[in-house]
Image (tube, rainbow, N blue to C red):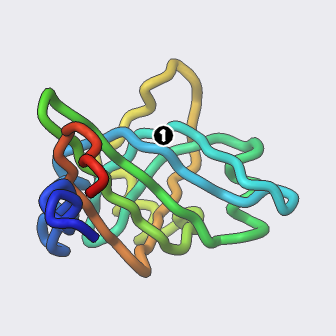
Amino acid sequence: MTQFEDAAFSDMTDEEAWEFLREHFFGRLAVSVSDQPEIFPFNYVVQNGTLVFRTAQGTKLAGLTVNEHVAVEIDGYHVTGGWSVVVKGRAHAAEWGEDFELAQIAGLKPWVGTRKPVFVRITPDQVTGRRFVFGPEPDDL
């Protein structure tokens, strides 16, 4: 890696990555459905070291039922650079009882005017983040 490439990227600490997750509410959820990758936009909240989102019956929930392993990406950019946080973990529908009640008080509302009665909790196995600086491609020496 060149000196320019070192300056163009920087890894976030765990706390920085979690701070970005707490400050933002929209991302993409990757699941496996019938051995094919699927990506869904979704809104979420951070609650007690997990991500919580709402959904209805359909492809996303069916995929999570068959394969609990998921990936989430949130990212953003501004004039001079951007950032990306990736979460890899396991998703499960919040069961009735304490888990469901805790999810209900997370303050999560659907963005689209449809019923999304199922709360899903993602328990991270890995959280990584990276910042990057926009700039020209370096000259080959």
Amino acid type, mark 1: Phe
Residue 116 occupies which quadrant of the picture? top right
The residue shown at (25%, 48%) is 138
The percent coordinates of residue 21 (x first, y second) are: 25, 55
The percent coordinates of residue 65 (x first, y second) are: 73, 65
Above or below for 53 versus 31: above
Mark 1: few/some/many CA within 10 Å (<14, 14-19, 20+): some
Q: Report the quarter where the C terminus lies.
A: bottom left
The percent coordinates of residue 33 (x first, y second) are: 79, 56
The percent coordinates of residue 95 (x first, y second) are: 56, 67
User: Along the line of sight, which residue is nearer the eye, 14 or 60?
Assistant: 14
User: Along the line of sight, which residue is nearer the eye, 29 or 115?
Assistant: 29
Q: Quickly name the residue at label 1.
A: 42
Above or below for 107 versus 1: above
Above or below for 83 versus 124: above
66 vs 121, left or right, is right
Q: Report the quarter where the N terminus lies.
A: bottom left
The residue shown at (80%, 55%) is 36
The residue shown at (57%, 24%) is 114
Q: Residue furthest bottom?
A: 125
Above or below for 83 versus 97: above
Q: Secondary structure at mark 1?
A: strand
The residue shown at (58%, 30%) is 115
Q: Residue furthest front?
A: 141
115 vs 49, left or right, is right
Q: Residue furthest right?
A: 34
- Total marks shown come to 1
